[in-house]
Amino acid sequence: MKALWNAEKQKRILFLCNNYAQVEVAYLIANSSQLNFIIYSNIDPVSTLEKLKRFKKKADIKFVFNFNSILFTFPNVSCVITFVGHISPVLRSEFTNVLKLAIKTKTPIVEVPHGLFQYGFGFSDDSSIIESASTDYGFGLPYDSIVPNKVSFLGEDGVGNPRSLMGQLRKIPLTECVLPRYAVISTNTNWYMYDEHDQLVFFDLIFQFANLNSDLIFIWCPHPSEVSSPANSAFNTMMKMRPPNIFLYGLDRDIYFYQFETTEELISSSLFGISSVSSVLADYQFFSKPCYVFNNGRFDDIFSLFSSVTLFKNIDDLSTQQSVPPKNLLLKSFDSRKFDAIISNITDLSQSSSEDISSYVEFL
């Protein structure tokens, strides 16, 4: 506790996080930065903070888990960083209200990616029907973010991928963990670029390969929407027929390792992986883990960004090829100094006034 007249009054950067994966990326950035952060998410605070205990805490990071507390602390916010820069029907109203509040008070907003391949950050599709919250259709064209400032993780102008910090920020180094021999299966087939036929072919190839390697454990890490979406019947149906050496990962599922909360951490200690086109390809690269990547013929432009990647379409590709770690030419480790400089420049150029901030009372 400090008396108010002795307390150091600091402006903070507010991170808007829509799920735990985004909270973790924000936490990694905040712990490597010289700036001061508040991380906001409306997920369960107890489980979130418990999971984050496995990381070193190097910075004075504050957390907010409800919108009313955002209103209370917003006068101390100098910038809002969001992982989603478009109006999406899957975003909760609290998130759009924070963006409205920032616009109303002239607080700068910055968009950063939430994935390696993302609409608005160098990725678009050819869907003839535009549907922003569908597993059957896509965005159909490149879109412009409603957020005026964007910071990319890729390329020469980017700041690097924060997930590269995971190994160095863990309290227990990943290299010191003693685990069984296993391969990782990482999938996110619950979006437009994979139809039901692709899913069935992909999963069947994985089953065949697991049967050919019956002495090896395969740990499957599906995207949360693959498991929870009622529309994704292919995944839920196929899981009932999986070979006995394939295990779904999670504390409430088939297998779980203490303090291994994410697919990234499982990748770090695996022998190799089998994956769809996914953000975790960055983790296979950072941890130098070989990976087979399913090729359904729709990602040629994406694969051209890799100097090395092991693709497969059939069981012969899986059983006869020696996989290598993927290497994305645009991917590099996170540069916290560069990130801090960009954010500081944005906040310096756009300072909100006390008169602007007083307008937040209309959200009460």
Image (tube, grey):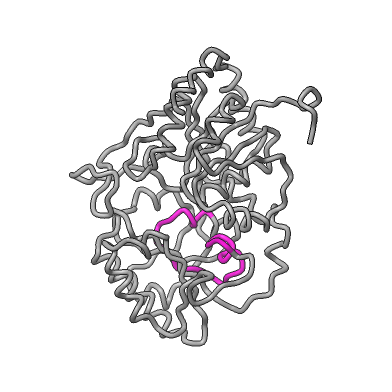
**Could you tell me residue 18's position as x and y percent?**
46, 45
Q: Which residues are magenta?
A: 261-282
Depth check: give the residue in front, 53 or 305: 53
Residue 41 in the image, given as x and y percentages of width and height: 51, 44
Residue at (51% x, 87% y) in the render: 215
User: Residue at 29% of width from left, 47% of height from top?
Assistant: 133
Asked if residue 336 lies left or right of residue 361, the reply is right
Can the viewer see residue 154? no
User: x%, y% of residue 14?
Assistant: 57, 34
In the rendered view, does 161 fall on the left or right side of 60? left
Q: Is residue 277 magenta?
A: yes
The front one of 219 and 275 is 219
Q: State the count of labels.
A: 0
Placement of the N terminus among the 4 image quadrants: top right
Is residue 117 depicted above or below 225 in this figure? above
Q: Residue furthest left?
A: 128
Q: Residue at x 79, y 32 (%)?
A: 2
